[in-house]
Image (cartoon, helix red, strand yellow):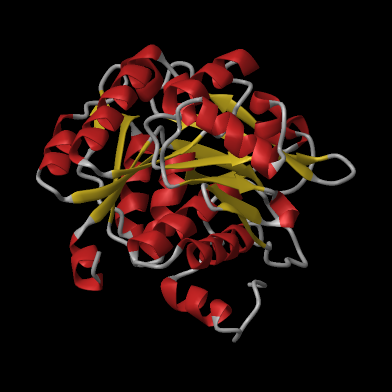
Amino acid sequence: MTEDRTRTLRVLTFGEPLVVCVPERAGKLYHVRRFHTDCAGAELNTAVGLARLGVPVSYLAKVGDDPFGEQIRRALREEGVEDRLVTASHRFSTGIYFKQWSGLDGRTEVFYYRNQSAMAQEGFSTDLAEEALHAGEIAWVHGTGITWMIGEAARRASDALVAAAVRVGATVSFDINVRLKLAPEDAWRALLEHMAPKATWLFLGDTEAEMLLGTARAQEVWAAIQGLGFRGEGVIVKRGADGAEWLSEGGALQVPAWPVSNVVDTVGAGDGFNAGFIAGRMKGWNTEDALKLAALVGACAVTAEGDSQGYPTWREAMSYLEGQGGVER
């Protein structure tokens, strides 16, 4: 794929957007009285990360016909994410969640209020996205397991969209992104088995690999994923402070994590990692260099409050990669 051709193609991410309520200070939520709101959701975060890195990106979702839904659409446009595939429900609301920082380590916990959200209840239409795929406008489709797990309508729509992408030969990346609040382990294991044969790139964390495959060892993970029918280009295992690994027929290639001296909020780091990797590949980079960019974006993510506030611009990312700066912001 040439650089000129890459500029004419888009990435499509799809999944439920949420408004997140961020507390003004650490502590149990029943002690906190003030919050500010922001926009979040795994696939929305990845779309924002891609736009910051200069990759044309569209986002497919459904929101409520309410102020939170409008907030999400405005935020997407401000970031340069195309929102024409975002529709609004007149019956159900936009999902929300709250963050909490508490305990000796100040770790982040989240509390979701999404069971009656527009996307969980009604799913989303794939018609326009499928038209764009068949027209050759979309080169890459990215989703996470969360979308399959929020409701049956969303699961059907996700399957339809992925099937359309596979038919036209678009790249499909899938991050299992386990959320046990949505479904038990066996359901996530079944979803991984369902999606493995369809994905070009498969993302999972080392703890997810342990949970779903019984191992996080590179060769064993690769063998297990192949046993599920995976025939794509590679499996990416995120290992937190130990970096990430690309598993393929050629073996395992490891890329170290970027050092971060002050971790503020870890939510959104994995989504930023995905954005960095997809951006690198869309720009024609080899897998190792794309993984380095992914690790950088993931590191930047944890240095700021909010899911995507820490994601770098393309100029910032290039400055870091060229050794002109660290990830402290």
Q: Is residue 80 above or below residue 228?
A: below
Residue 52 shows in this picture: yes
In percent of width and height, residue 87 lies at 24, 33
Residue nearest the viewer, comparing 34 with 232: 232
Q: Quadrant of the N terminus?
A: bottom left
In percent of width and height, residue 256 lies at 68, 63
Q: Residue at the location (56% across, 21% down)?
A: 188
Q: Please indicate whether residue 315 sits to the left or right of residue 166 in the image.
A: right
Residue 268 shows in this picture: no
Q: Quadrant of residue 79?
A: bottom left
In percent of width and height, residue 297 lies at 55, 62
Q: Residue lying farthest bottom?
A: 324
Q: How many marks?
A: 0
Q: Is residue 177 above or below residue 51?
A: above
Q: Residue at the location (29% across, 16% down)?
A: 91
Q: Quadrant of the C terminus?
A: bottom right
Q: Residue at the location (26% across, 30% down)?
A: 161
In percent of width and height, residue 20 lies at 53, 39
Q: Residue at the location (49% across, 22% down)?
A: 193
Residue nearest the viewer, comparing 228 with 87: 228
Q: Quadrant of residue 108?
A: top right
